[in-house]
Image: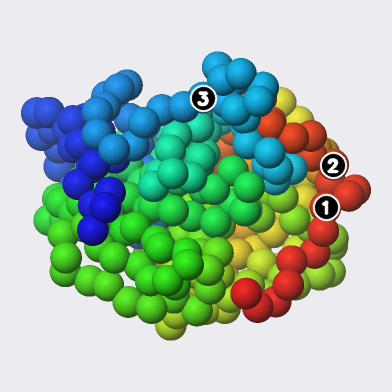
Amino acid sequence: MAGATDGGLMKSRLRRVGSHLWRRPALGAALLGGLLVAPAVAAEFSGAVQAQRLTDLPMAERVAGPAATPFGPGERMNYQVKLGMASVGNGHMEVHGIESIRGSRAYHVSMGIRGGIRFVARVDNLFESWMDVETLASHRFIQDQDELRTQRHRQFDFYHAARRFVRADGEESGDMITDRPLDDISFVYYARTLPLVVGETYTLNHYFRPDRNPVVLRVLRKDRIQVPAGTFNTIVVQPIIKTRGLFSEGGEAEIHFSDDDRRLMVYMQSRVPGMNLSLHLRDFTPGRPLRAFSAAEASTPASSP
């Protein structure tokens, strides 16, 4: 299958050299929840995925109808990660740039965490997604996990027209119920583009695995929160995915997005066994959106594909 062994696979593998850490697998899995990831060490890679930053292209070659987004190439948010009151590591969200996947231009985004408690639990994981610039649908999702008893690398490619997903190692494939699939990471970025009206619930049938639909986003309230990056007015959203991860129903996760047109993820919390896991925005670098986003003009998504 085209794209199954390209540069995304190589990039994720390059960053792990000489990692000798003590980790507890149950806690490590809860920290990640199939979602959070560590910053990439390898800056460049080769293969079928070719970097094509729209800001470097002539105007005539740029995407004709990019979706309005609060994010764009160059955006990076860095986080302090805590277990309870203890600072245990660092996290990030980043829009690396625009790349080509099977002829479609896509945002290469990642979301991550690295750290833990020495001699108790350490994690170093990289999860990445490639989101179509026009539709925001995911073309590819990579999970790269490194924990005590879990070293897993999985790459999923999504074929929109055929409504099929295929794992690069050939171990798994299946039908999708949508031609605009989303994965764990792209859902967070996609949520930033929604109206996020307090009291509303957004029910979405766009997760690439059919049995994990629908994904529910409940907009709970507005809040004001202080983090290392400053004090922010926020909109509090509870995401629920049918998974064992941070966004499972039992995790009672909450994401605080800034109540402005940037929609920064200022703070996130979830329950892990025995304590709270939280991410606190430490600093951020704004990106360059390809099309201006206005929260006031954001449209409500359909409940089904």
Q: Badge 3 is on which residue?
A: 53
- Protein image colouring: rainbow
Check the image and report above or below for 209 versus 24: below
CA gap, disc 3 to disc 1? 25 Å
* Closer mark to the observer between disc 2 and disc 3: 3
Residue plotted at (62% across, 53% down): 135
Q: Name the image quarter holding the N terminus.
A: bottom left
Amino acid type, callout 1: Ala
Check the image and report above or below for 253 versus 295: below
Residue plotted at (31% across, 58% down): 156
Secondary structure under badge 2?
Answer: loop
Amino acid type, callout 3: Arg
Q: Badge 2 is on which residue?
A: 294
Q: Badge 1 is on which residue?
A: 298
Secondary structure under badge 3?
Answer: loop
CA gap, disc 2 to disc 1? 6 Å
Residue plotted at (84% across, 46% down): 295
Name which quarter of the figure residue 8 lies in. Answer: top left
Determine contact: label 2, label 1, CB under 8 Å.
yes
Task: Name the outermost residue toward the front.
Answer: 60
Q: Residues within 10 Å of mark 2 (few under 14, many from 20)?
A: some
Task: Name the outermost residue toward the bottom.
Answer: 211
